[in-house]
Each structure stands twice: as structure tokens, then as C-alpha cells.
Image: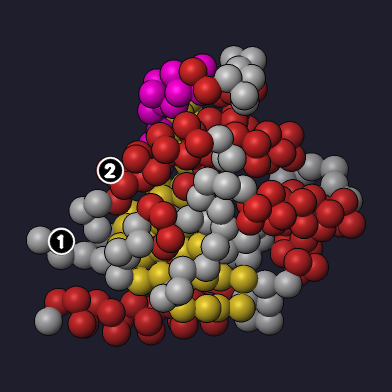
Amino acid sequence: MRKELIVAIDGPSGAGKSTLSKALARKIGYINIDTGAMYRSVALLADRQRVNVADEKALRQLCSNLRIEFVRDAEQERVIVNGEDVSMAIRTPEVSLLTTKVAASRVVREAMVDLQRRMGQSGGVVLEGRDIGTVVFPQAEVKFFLSATVEERGRRRYDELLARGMAVDLQQTIIEIKARDAADSAREHGPLRRADDAADIDSTKLTIDEVLAEMLKIIAERRQAFSE
Ligand code: DC
């Protein structure tokens, strides 16, 4: 019997999922699993190894050789793939673009969903992504669907890229976010979809602390019910 909860956070790009799932996991002592980083890592390797995203056999091979770890220290969380710290390399606009294609591949989704289930099955985890509450863990005890307007999400992503020293344009960033939303929602396998039993949180006008407080309230209630 599982003693701890599975917490799912889904929503579109730039809604605040990464920041909040990290903060939430730290606060309640859970492990944070950034599933977007997993798809990004597959895209990075596919790019480096010149694997065509239409080549299912090569993608399956690449996924089966993928060792991914999330390492948390006092300051930050790092993504280690096959022993290499790829935390920065997986966040470039080029990799983001390729990730949308890679994440639409059935073989990649099957491999990542399988890995995510193995990583999260014992509970005590916060998983963030697009299909956690619908496909990966439909039985999750807590599900959040985090959203914000596309303009606000574009502005946040723009600020984030700027802070990393990348040369970007705000309007272009909003256009890219819209394209990513459309691709994520329209794909056949594991599309971005709100689970019927998810709690909706619109972060457009809320601070991180306000969203966190809302999430903690819901989790405290579920934890109470879960342990009874
Ligand atoms: O959350 P993110 O921006 O790091 O996600 C990168 C890409 O991966 C984005 O195009 C959506 C996709 N993704 C997905 O298809 N399924 C997930 N569970 C997580 C991310």
C-alpha cells in the first residue's frame, strides 16, 4: 500500500508548472519529476545523434539507452542524461522546437510514460507535464491544471530566456508558445488535456506564493483523507 500521494500538474507552456512543482516538492518533501525535461532530453540526443524523428526504430533504441536522473542540491535542480549535465542544453529554442516533434512520436511517448510510471509508482512525487493526470497517472490523488493567458505565458518565457542571456523577441516568443500549444493539444498520442477531476488554477494574476498556498491547501486536505 502506498503511503504518499501522487501529485499531477498539467498545463500549457509557461503557466508556471516547473517553478511550482519544484517549490511544491521542496515544501512537502516529495520528489519532483519534470517530464518535459525527459522529452527535451530525447530531442537533444536525437539531434546530436542525427536521428530522424520519423525513424521509430532508431528512436526506440535511443529511448531504451536513456538514463535520466534529476539531481537536487540546495540551489537548483539539474538534469543528468547518461552522466552528462544537460540542464542548460535542453532549454534552447532549437531543442524546444525539436521536442514538440519528438513528443508527438508514439514510441517516444510509450517509453517515457513507462519510465514516468516506474519513477512515480511508490508515491511521494510531484510530476509535471501535459498528460500526467490523463494518461500517466489517471489514479493520481491530486491533479492540478495550471493555466494563464498566452500573452502572460509568452512574457514569462521571454523573461526567462532573457535572464539566461539568450537573444529573443517578445512577439516571436508569444507566436512560438501559440504554435507549441496548438501542436501539444492537437497531437494524437498523449495530447495536452485537462483531466475531468483536476483542480483548475489560473496563474495569470497570481504570484507564485499565492498559487503555492492554493496547492498546499488542496494537498493538505487530500493527505488527511488519504491517511484516514
Ligand atoms: O514543459 P516543457 O516546456 O519543458 O515541455 C517541452 C515539450 O515537451 C513541450 O512541447 C510539451 C512536451 N511534453 C509532452 O508532450 N508531455 C509531457 N508530459 C511533458 C512535455
The quarter of the image holding the C terminus is bottom left
| Residue in the image at 51% along x and 17% along y | 58
Horizontal and vertical percent position of residue 170? 87, 56
Distance between mark 1 and mark 2 Cα atoms: 14 Å
Q: From the Cβ of disc 2, is ligand 1 less than 8 Å away?
A: no
What type is the residue that disc 1 sits on? Arg
Mark 2 lies on a secondary structure that is helix
| Residue in the image at 71% along x and 39% along y | 97
Q: From the Cβ of disc 1, is ligand 1 less than 8 Å away?
A: no
- In the image, the segment drawn in magenta is 58-71
Mark 2 lies on residue: 118
| Residue in the image at 46% along x and 68% along y | 195
| Residue in the image at 38% along x and 28% along y | 67
Q: Is residue 106 above or below residue 132?
A: above
Is residue 54 shown left or right of residue 10?
right
Residue 128: in magenta span: no
Of residues 171 and 178, the one nearer the viewer is: 178
What type is the residue that disc 2 sits on? Arg
